[in-house]
Amino acid sequence: MTEARASTALNERYLQVRRVTVVGSAVDLSLGIIKIVGGWFSHSQALIADGVHSLSDLATDVLVLYAAKHAHAEADEDHPYGHARIETAATVGLGIALMLISTGIVYDSVSALLEPDLLVAPEAWAIALAAVSAISKEAVYHYTMRYSRRLNSELLRANAWHSRSDAISSLVVIIGVGGALLGHTSLDAVAALVVAAMIGKIGFDVAKSSVGELIDTGLDADRLDDIRDIIQSVDGVDSLHLLRTRRMAGRVLVDVHLILSDARVSVSEGHQISETVRSRLMGHFESIADVTVHIDPEDDEHAAPGKHLGLRDQVLGRLKERWQHLPAAHQIRRVNLHYLNGRIHVEVELPLALGTDPDQAAGNAAAFSDAAVGDSDIASVRVLYS
């Protein structure tokens, strides 16, 4: 994806998140005011708690709008991976806010239960207000959840569940008010406690999931198995290890080490295989935003057996000293080094004319190989002609 297309996609995503959240905010504001005022006049503790829940939705809607605006900013020098984790941090804040609201409702409800003489039976019309709230918030839930799936946004998904918790709490209010009207006055306060427990549980789950993302918790085992299957289906890949994933506000970043079927392929072929792996993963999993592939000639998950070996200039310097007395050494076209199993396998490329005579070719091979004997880092020497 080009930089311009990526910028356009980010802006479009932000506009959709903002539109969905503004619609939900309008509903939350209206319902919050109606339920709190209605709960006050109908003497329903549970309906007031439900109204506070709706206004908490409004507060978190504001948080969602702020986070969405800044989270969709483009990557810059200080934030090369973008700003998506602002959305994750905001989701943690949303979860904490839900738990605090839950604590407040519990305090008020327990206080009411400890003073039963102050409990007043709610009015019947409180049920109608709760029913309107349940229907409205369930509609907001489905509307928001549809866009959360489309945009793969954990923040919208959390906000959608916030709306559904309000719808469910309204159903609990209906039960509580109905019980109170039948003579069980304390049932209204008990219903408020149930609502509080639901709010607290949702807040905890939202915060826990997002904190896990902030500390780079990887994908679950099933998703990792799917990723492995795609990688191992690519021609040229023998196996893989050090598969690591992390999430950033609905996006997934992957890095993996690959062992190829042939450890001696060219750099360009290894790069082509890695690009194919990257393309297939991003094409198959919409949530994967980037893949980093490291090509290994052998399994170095636990140790790098060749880390003590020198680099090209150092190795060739030693070999040239050993080969300087060989007539063919002055016509070397290319030397390839393969670092395998803790040693170096050398390929010497000579002009084709030097290999037309079988005896001469065999002599060259023996001479280069014999001259390298004594260098403990060298495992083998092959002479090729082109």
Image: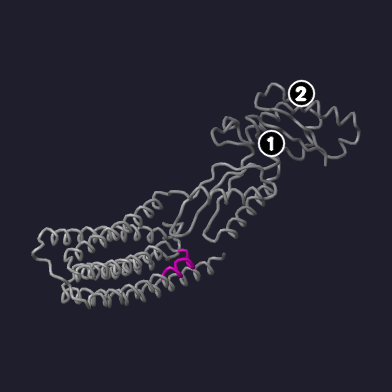
> Can you say which quadrant of the picture contains the C terminus?
top right
> In the image, is residue 11 part of the stretch drawn in magenta?
no
Q: Nearer the viewer, residue 35 or 261?
A: 35
Say what secondary structure mark 1 lies in.
Answer: strand
What is the residue that sits farthest to the top in this orientation?
374
For residue 105, the mark is none
Query: Who comes first in sequence, dot 1 or dot 2?
Result: 1
Residue beneath the point at 66% across and 33% down:
340
Tell whether 288 sits left or right of 143.
Answer: right
- Quarter of the image for residue 332 reads top right
Dominant secondary structure (helix, strand or loop) of the stretch shown in magenta? helix
Q: Nearer the viewer, residue 241 or 271?
A: 241
308 lies above or below 36 = above
Is the C-beta separation of discs 1 and 2 under 8 Å?
A: no
* Location of residue 83 in the rendering, given as x and y in whole percent from the top left corner: 41, 60
Q: Nearer the viewer, residue 248 or 196?
A: 196
For residue 337, the mark is 1
* Location of residue 187 in the rendering, given as x and y in whole percent from the top left corner: 20, 64
What is the residue that sits farthest to the left in this orientation?
117
* Location of residue 135 in the rendering, given as x and y in whole percent from the top left corner: 35, 75
- Quarter of the image for residue 22 reads bottom left
Tell whether 295 sits left or right of 73.
Answer: right
For residue 370, the mark is 2
* Location of residue 78 in the rendering, given as x and y in whole percent from the top left corner: 41, 56
Region rendered in magenta = 144-152
> Can you say which quadrant of the picture contains the N terminus?
bottom right
290 lies above or below 301 = below
Please state which amino acid type lies under the numbered disc 1. Answer: Leu
Q: CA distance from mark 1 to mark 2?
A: 17 Å
